[in-house]
Amino acid sequence: MHADIERELISQTQIAERIETLAAEIVRDHAAAGEISMVPVLTGGMIFCSDLIRKMPIAMKIGMLAVSSYPGRAVHSHGAVLTDARVGDLNGRHVVIVDDILDTGGTLKLVQSELLERGAAAVRSCVLLRKLRAGVSPMPCDYVGFDIPDEFVVGYGLDYDDYYRNLPSICTLKPAAFARRA
Ligand code: IMP
Ligand code: MG
């Protein structure tokens, strides 16, 4: 285990099992449409999306959007900004946004309106994690892997200062890891 990890919240096995279920639900919900466009939100959503799509036996195109909301060593959202879009022609297409985590909802809101503006017929969203904050009701999301408490997590795409995305499970970091990169 990586020396900076404090605690593992969700294991590789739990993630893999949950992805099987989510993939089946998404395929079922798009059976009538017959085709789907998957749009991971970079950088955090790419690992989740790459595992998810390989469990989805359906005609599929893949686009990509890049959004920045936690620049550098930030551990709270600074507001979502679209920094790149490679989604092709979305006119009339059924699109699923894939992100690592739903926190304030700023990212999903931004991406949803961007994709609708580009002509998508339907936009659904899928996140691996949803952070639950006391007294705040989360924005609607069609597919949610796991609800987690309001803690800063890394791994499986999620970063701190762009590090730790390659950890295979969802973990919290030791205070010393934050201090060292500060
Ligand atoms: P939102 O726009 O506030 O919903 O935040 C979503 C984005 O913030 C995600 O796509 C992540 O990139 C980032 N984020 C939110 N919480 C965490 C966390 O605990 N660790 C790492 N990144 C996070
Ligand atoms: Mg992100």
Image (cartoon, rainbow, N blue to C red):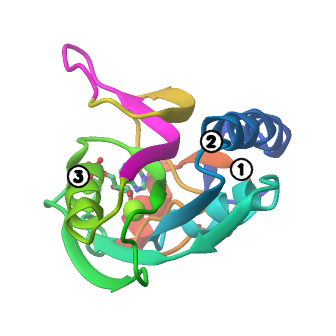
Q: Which residue is mark 3?
A: 76
Q: Quadrant of the N terminus?
A: bottom right
Q: Give the crowd class for mark 3: few <14, some 14-19, many >=20 residues within 10 Å.
A: few
Query: Do the numbered discs 2 and 1 sit on residues whose CB atoms are within 8 Å?
Result: no
Q: Residue furthest left?
A: 79
CA separation in Å, label 2 and label 3: 39 Å
Which amino acid type is shown beneath numbered disc 2?
Ala
N-term mark: 2 or 3: 2
Q: Is residue 128 magenta?
A: yes
Residue closer to the observer: 43 or 159: 43
Indicate if the residue with disc 1 has its beta carbon within 8 Å of ligand 1.
no
What residue is shown at x 32% (from left), y 29% (from top)? 140
Q: Is residue 173 magenta?
A: no
Q: Which residue is mark 1?
A: 169
Element assignment for label 3: loop
Q: Give the crowd class for mark 2: few <14, some 14-19, many >=20 residues within 10 Å.
A: few
Q: Which residue is mark 2?
A: 32
Q: Is residue 133 above or below residue 166?
A: above
Instruction: Tell me the quarter of the picture where residue 74 sits.
Output: bottom left
User: How far across and down, in percent of the image, does residue 128 sit?
Assistant: 56, 43
User: How far across and down, in percent of the image, does residue 73 sit?
Assistant: 31, 69
